[in-house]
Amino acid sequence: MSLGTSSEQRETYRELLYRDYLATHSGDLGEARRSLHGAGPYLRRLIRKFLPQDRNIRILELGCGYGALLYWLTQAGYRCLEGIDRSPEQVEGAHQLGLDFVRQDDLMAHLAKRASASCDVVIAFDVLEHFAKEEALLFSDRVFRALAPGGIFIIHLPNGEGIFSGAVVYGDFTHEVTLTRKSLGQMLRCSGFSQVNTYEDTPVVHGMVSAGRYLMWKAFRTLLRLGYAAETGDIDPGLILTRNLLAVARKGLPGGQR
């Protein structure tokens, strides 16, 4: 009895796991929806800090889930939005939020058929870690083609060199690859991105409790940084120690314009 090729086996298990992803990994749609406003401060900061101010830019979110980020983008006034997710369960959840521009599709297939330079911003929030290495590079290549010159690719993913990152890396059976700021930058530059900036995924201050969390993290990070420097001699200020990281990659303008 043939079990098929490794790619066929991977596709079979993905179909099984992603069909009911919320139910098998995160609880249910109701539970996810209850976290929508709790995630608001973090997502509003991301929008404010990394998104262009022009509310008419074309934004595509790949692997958008039930639409938490897209919801807050609509609240911020952005109008040209698209969302793609493989899970019918997640897409239905997005439609219940009024996000009727979210569609069900395979992410790779969508990018393959999408017109070149058809969006200004592409967002992949907790997506890249679900691909094998060769798939992640192909995904990056296809995002690069879909972006207009000067467009940006915003990525959130587990941080391979972060403290306590194992809980994120191994906390989802569908995770396949773990990257650091350096390996992520290596991959993105191979795809043609001319500028890659990475950031720690720090607590957002929006009240007394979160302010306390932020101050405790800063103190704890200082100790961790000293320990890292003592072991390695590395005093690189760009070291990222949070469990997740954010990256913003830019597609250069023709002729090297800025």
Image (cartoon, rainbow, N blue to C red):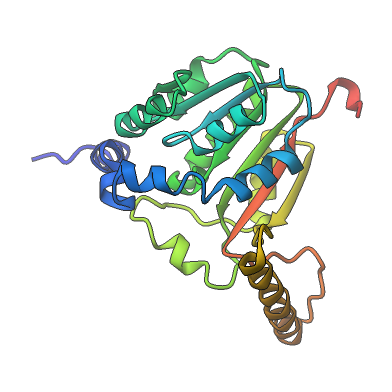
Identity of the residue drawn at 63% across and 15% down: 116
Horizontal side of 203 relative to 131 (left or right) equals: right
Q: Residue furthest front?
A: 208
Horizontal side of 163 relative to 152 (left or right) equals: left
The quadrant of the image that shows the C terminus is: top right
Horizontal side of 29 relative to 124 (left or right) equals: left
Res 119 quadrant in image: top right
Q: Is residue 65 above or below residue 40?
A: above
Identity of the residue drawn at 48% across and 44% down: 36
Residue 88 lies, in percent from the top left, at 31, 29
Q: Residue furthest top?
A: 115
Horizontal side of 215 relative to 3 (left or right) equals: right
Decide which of 249, 34 is in the foreground and name it: 34
Residue 201 lies, in percent from the top left, at 65, 58
Q: Is residue 201 above or below residue 189?
A: below
Identity of the residue drawn at 37% across and 27% down: 96
Residue 43 lies, in percent from the top left, at 61, 44
Q: Is residue 118 above or below residue 235?
A: above
Residue 187 lies, in percent from the top left, at 64, 45
Decide which of 254, 8 is in the foreground and name it: 254
Identity of the residue drawn at 90% across and 27% down: 256
Res 170 quadrant in image: bottom left
The quadrant of the image that shows the N terminus is: top left
Q: How many numbered marks are there? A: 0
Res 11 quadrant in image: top left
Decide which of 21, 151 is in the foreground and name it: 21
